[in-house]
Structure formats: C-alpha cells, structure tokens
Image (spheres, helix red, strand yellow):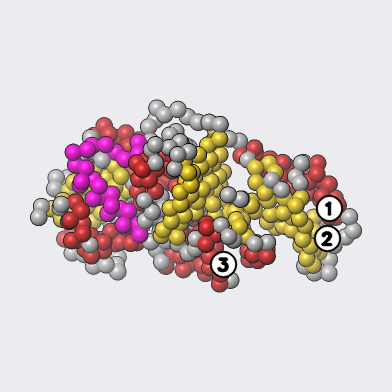
Amino acid sequence: MEKVKIALLGFGNVGQGVWKILNTNKREIMINCGYEVEVGKILVRDKNKPRAVEVPDSIVTTDINDILSDKDIKIVVELMGGSEPSKEYILSSLKAKKHVVTANKLLLATVGDELISTADAEGVQFYYEASVGGGIPVIREINESLTANKIESIVGIINGTTNYILTKMSQESMGFEEALKEAQAKGYAEADPTSDVEAYDSVYKLAIMASLAFSTKVDSSSIYREGICKIDSIDIDYAKKFGYVIKLLAIGKEIDNELELRVHPTMISKNHPIANINDSFNAIFIKGNAVGDLLLSGRGAGDLPTGSAVVGDIISIIRNKADLRSIGEIKSNLPLKKVKDFNEATSRYYIRLQVADIAGVLGEIAAVFGQYDVSILSVNQEVIDKDSVSLVFITHSAKEGNVSNSMKVIESLDHVNQIASIIRIEEF
Ligand code: NAP
Ligand code: HSE
C-alpha cells in the first residue's frame, strides 16, 4: 500500500486525537482513501514536555523548516491554535505546495479569505471542517449538501466548553470555576479559556458559518457578543421555575438581505430539542428555503470528535488529489451584506433587579418600561432581606435598543440597587 506523509503542527488535545485515530482506524482509513496515512513529522514548542501519547523522538521537531523542506510531506495539519505563528506556518506550507488542514477558527474568521486565496493561487487544497462544531460535519453540509438552498437562519450551541459549564451548573449545581476546570481537564477548552467563556470562540465559528451560509464576508467584530461569566445560579433557578434552560446561543439570520448576527446566553423552552443538548455536545439548526429545518448534533469538542473531522479532511484531500479546489471559498469579491444594527433586534427579556422594599418602586420601574415601549408579561417578587427585594420581569418581544435605554434610566432610579441580570428569551 502506498503511503501519504503528513505533518502535525501541534501535538496537544487535537493533535494527539488525530494520532490516535490514524493508528486505531488505520485499516478503515486505507480502505476509504486507498493510501496509508503516515505522520512524518510533528512540530511542538517543547520537545521534553511529558505527553499522554508516545511518539518516536525522531519525528518530533521544534523547527518548522524541517517540515517545509521535506518534499515527502504532502499535507500539513495545523493544530497549534492562536494567530501567530499559525498563520505564517500555514501560508508557508501552502507556498511550499503542501495541502493544509486546520481546526483554527480564529484564523478562519479573521484571515480565512487570505488563506483560501493563497491555497487557490498555489493550486493546493485547504480544509477546515474541525473549526466549527468539533466532530459535526457542518462546513461540508453548508458547502455541499445544502447548496441548492437559500439559507435563512443558523441557530445553535457551538461551544462545547460553555455548554459543559452551563450543564454542570444547571444539573449538578456545580460552581462556574469548578465546571470550567473540568472542561479544561477533558480537553474541551481553548488554551486561554477566556475565548470560550466570553464567547469569542462562538463568534469566530458563527462568522465562518455565516460567511458560507449567506455567501458574504462576515467581519467577526460585527457580531454582538456576550459570554456566560455573569450567569448566576439564581438565574438558572429562575429559568427552571419559568420552564426555561439557559444556553449560549449563536444566532445568524438573513432577513431582507440584511444579516442579524449575535451570540449571547439565551433562555429557551425546556421542551425545545436544543434545551436537551448537554455537556460538550453542540447542536446547529439550519433553515433552508428548500430543505426546511435541519438539526445537526454531536460532540463539539474533545480530542477524538475533533480528530474525526480533521482526519476526514485529510482523507478528502487524498481522495480529491485531482481536484485542486479549496473547500468553501470565502471569496473576497462576494457582495457584502449589511449587518443589522443590534439595537433593532427583537427578543423577549428576563430582567432581574435588586430594589429597595419601598412602596411605589415597582410602579416607577413599570412606568419607565412603558415609556420605552417595553411591555411586561409577568413580574415576580421575592424578599432578599429586610430592606430589599428581587424583582424579576419577563417582557413581551421588545427592541434591544428600547430595552437598553430603559435599563439606563431604571439603573439611575434612587431605589434600584442593582441590575443583577438581563437574559434574552428566544422562541423558535
Ligand atoms: P493544545 O492542547 O493547547 O495544543 C496546542 C499544541 O500546539 C501543543 O502541542 C503546543 O506545543 C503546540 N504549539 C503551540 N504553539 C506552538 C508554537 N509556536 N510552535 C510549535 N508548537 C506550538 O490545543 P488543542 O486543544 O489541541 O487545539 C488546537 C487547535 O484546535 C486550536 O486552534 C483550537 O481552537 C482547535 N480546536 C480545538 C478543539 C478542542 O476540543 N480542543 C476542538 C476544535 C478545534 P507543546 O505541546 O510543546 O506546548
Ligand atoms: N474550545 C472549543 C469548544 C473547542 O469548547 O467548543 C471546539 O472548537
């Protein structure tokens, strides 16, 4: 059996997952692509670092030139993460006429068009299925299976770490920090988990999917972003009481040629299928004008699920050797679509305030909501201590701008001690 040599840039969670799959599923891979896939070189930062997976010393290097100059290496798999030197190494690999696979959503979302156009110019392939949804084949779905559709919306849970944290907080009353530590130990989190918990990772993934689904270039800085750090166990308990579950949702919609793009914690009905997507699982709902509603779900992070997508890309490249196309061109000449002003977006809202327990406070707050056209569906009051109460409002659908303006006024009221929490409620 002929061999195809590849190089791994990075041998952390995903790199080791790829190694394990290449060894465990050697036979299946040979049958599926007609070649044996051999790891010729592995680039790491620290050769002496102890690793759970043992590899021959002779293939481990800290010098990218060992890989770039090796003519036998046909495919470079970037699994280091971060922007530099990953970007430089990918570009150098493409220019050395090597095909590239990456799981790096930060790079795809920020400089994806440059990487793809370089691959096209060099006549090599560039694949990035693992950059969104871990083991879920969502990039291929959008790029290939759904190309007959005008895609109307993409809504989903696209970060495994935050879904793991929210699941543990909700189902086991675990604290945020402990749940994050567990997610890190399981290999789900980014090297800097701020990217997960502050929702940058979900923003990058939404930018990649939205660019492909809505055939435009999406600047990730145009996506509204709010992470899960402020979610309190009190909000989780209220959500349960009202029949909701809190999830970090990424929402992308095209309405009248304008895009609505946002990532934020969201209350959704406990009966919605997404409410039951737990732990590191991701779920992505796609609505196409021909196919209708489609749900893709699976492990969104972790060594083997992510490795599955990476090795699938390697196999595709080997199978396609006569086809020099990069998957899912994020073309720079596509028409730019306007991203809707977030203040115009509408949602229902859960708003929790701490206020002084004094006659007339509720009326004052309700009057402000009224002035800004924010209609209240329900109010719930609970005593916190002898001087203060917790007021929880659920609103009807209201404009983001109106809610935020009303909150500015409410915050300044004398008897309002704290705006403790604001969480959007979505119905699908
Ligand atoms: P990781 O565990 O932190 O591993 C990173 C690896 O890259 C390490 O082996 C590290 O070397 C190496 N590395 C980092 N900087 C380097 C440099 N300048 N030169 C040489 N080697 C360098 O990361 P990971 O979780 O595997 O994630 C890798 C990529 O996959 C990231 O882009 C991430 O966003 C993406 N991804 C991860 C998951 C997941 O579930 N973890 C899922 C989907 C996508 P040392 O070992 O010597 O330090
Ligand atoms: N840190 C990411 C997550 C890895 O938790 O979803 C998968 O992209």
Q: Residues within 10 Å of mark 3 (few under 14, many from 20)?
A: many
Q: Which residues are magenta?
A: 305-329
State whether label 2 is within 8 Å of ligand 2: no
Which secondary structure lies at badge 3? helix
- Three-letter code for the amino acid on which mark 2 is drawn: Ala
The residue furthest right is: 359
Q: Which residue is mark 1?
A: 414
Query: 151 above or below 387?
Result: above
Look at the numbered discs 1 and 2 and tell me whether their residues touch, using CB distance below 8 Å.
yes
Q: Is residue 345 left or right of residue 299?
A: right
The residue furthest left is: 1
Look at the numbered discs 1 and 3 and tell me whether their residues touch, using CB distance below 8 Å.
no
Q: Residue at x 50, y 39 (%)?
A: 152
Q: Which residue is mark 3?
A: 169
Which secondary structure lies at badge 1? loop
Residue 22, image quadrant = bottom left
Task: Say if residue 270 shows up in the picture.
Answer: yes
From the top left corner, tell me how far across and down residue 121 is, in percent: 26, 32
From the top left corner, tell me how far across and down residue 174 is, in percent: 56, 71
**Residue 32 among magenta residues:** no
Q: CA distance from mark 1 to mark 2?
A: 9 Å
- Three-letter code for the amino acid on which mark 1 is drawn: Asp
Q: Which residue is mark 2?
A: 356
Query: Given this view, does label 2 or label 3 mark the residue nearer the observer?
Result: 3
